[in-house]
Amino acid sequence: MPVGEGLDTEELKRLVHQDCGSCHGLTLKGGLGPDIRPETLTHYEPDILETVILDGIPDTPMPPWRPLITQEEAQWIALYLLNGDAQ
């Protein structure tokens, strides 16, 4: 099954831009958290970024999202962050 099939991708985009954007800036260019646009995340492999999304980063403001989203949703978000709307 292709990544994102069966997911509400419009709702996931909203989550990225509103919920993630509350710390990373509404344009994702950075704020409390760092810039998370595709050109700044090139050092991340998709599976590592997925883990960061799900488990957060200890001793930083980055929270774990595992209680709120599924692994499939985190995988889609990671690919969306790495590729933008071109995914």
Image: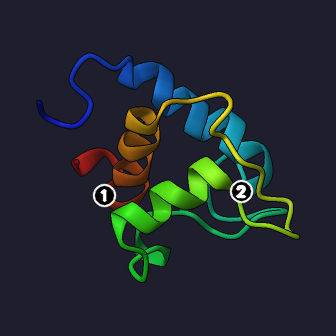
Mark 1, Cα crowd under 10 Å, few <14 / some 14-19 / many 20+, is some
The residue at which mark 2 appears reads as: 24
Determine whether the residue tagged by mark 1 lies in a helix, strand or loop.
Answer: helix
Q: Position of residue 70 (x, y in %)?
A: 49, 30
Q: Nearer the viewer, residue 17 or 44?
A: 44
In this picture, residue 71 sits left or right of residue 6: right
Task: Compare residues 37 and 47 and report the one nearer the observer.
Answer: 47
Q: Residue at x 57, y 39 (%)?
A: 16
User: Callout 2: few (<14), some (14-19), or many (20+) C-alpha neighbours within 10 Å?
Assistant: many
Q: Does 11 appear above or below 24? A: above
Q: Secondary structure at mark 2?
A: helix
Horizontal side of residue 3 vs 65, given as left or right: left
What amino acid type is highlighted by mark number 2?
A: His
Residue 34 left/right relative to 1: right
Q: How many marks?
A: 2
Q: Are marks 1 and 2 in contact (CB under 8 Å)?
A: no
Tell me where residue 31 appears, x and y as whole percent: 79, 62
Going from N to C along the chain, the mark reached first, 1 or 2, is 2
**Height in image: 47 above or below 8?**
below
Residue 66 pos. (x, y %): 63, 38
Q: Residue at x 48, y 28 (%)?
A: 12
Q: For residue 52, what is the image quadrant?
A: bottom right
**Quarter of the image holding residue 71?**
top left
Q: Residue at x 49, y 20 (%)?
A: 11
What label does residue 39 carry, if any? Answer: none
Q: CA distance from mark 1 to mark 2?
A: 17 Å
Q: Say which amino acid is labelled 1.
A: Asn
Give the residue at mark 1. Answer: 83
Query: Which residue appears at 36% of the width and 72% of the height?
Result: 45
